[in-house]
Amino acid sequence: MDHIIYSQGNQSVRKDRVALVLYDRATHCLDSIPSVNNDATCTKHCLIEFYRPELVKACTELETSRH
């Protein structure tokens, strides 16, 4: 996981100047998620966006196995 920080002239239409780059070794999934800045809150939201499908799947499986 790392951030790419672009210059003012390279920002997106939504004013995103940062991208969080994530690599999942287990699935070999590489992705970058745009963000306005690289503070803890924005990084947390990017991580949730990246891992959400796996977290939902894991929670569903845990709930199913309890019954």
Image: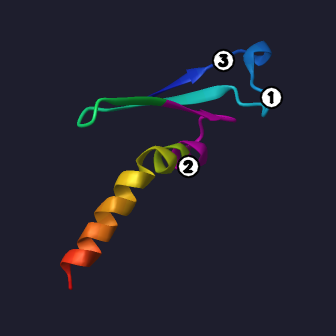
Report the residue at 41% width, 48% height from top: 51
Which callout, 2 or 3, points at the residue further toward the start of the chain? 3
Q: Residues within 10 Å of mark 3 (few under 14, many from 20)?
A: few
Nearer to the camera, 25 or 6:
25
Nearer to the camera, 1 or 65:
65
Q: Are marks 2 and 1 in contact (CB under 8 Å)?
A: no
Look at the numbered disc 2 and give the secondary structure of its residue: helix
Report the residue at 41% width, 53% height from top: 53
Q: Is residue 27 left or right of residue 22?
A: left
> Label 2 amino acid?
His
Which callout, 3 or 1, points at the residue further toward the start of the chain? 3
Nearer to the camera, 63 or 18:
63
Report the residue at 78% width, 31% height from top: 15
The residue tagged 1 is: 13
Which quadrant is the N terminus positioned in?
top left
> Label 1 amino acid?
Val
- Examine the rendering and report whether any part of residue 1 can be seen: no
CA–CA distance in space, label 2 to label 1:
19 Å
Which callout, 2 or 1, points at the residue further toward the start of the chain? 1
The residue tagged 2 is: 45
The residue tagged 3 is: 6
CA–CA distance in space, label 2 to label 3:
19 Å
**Residue 23 image position (x, y, % from top left):** 36, 30
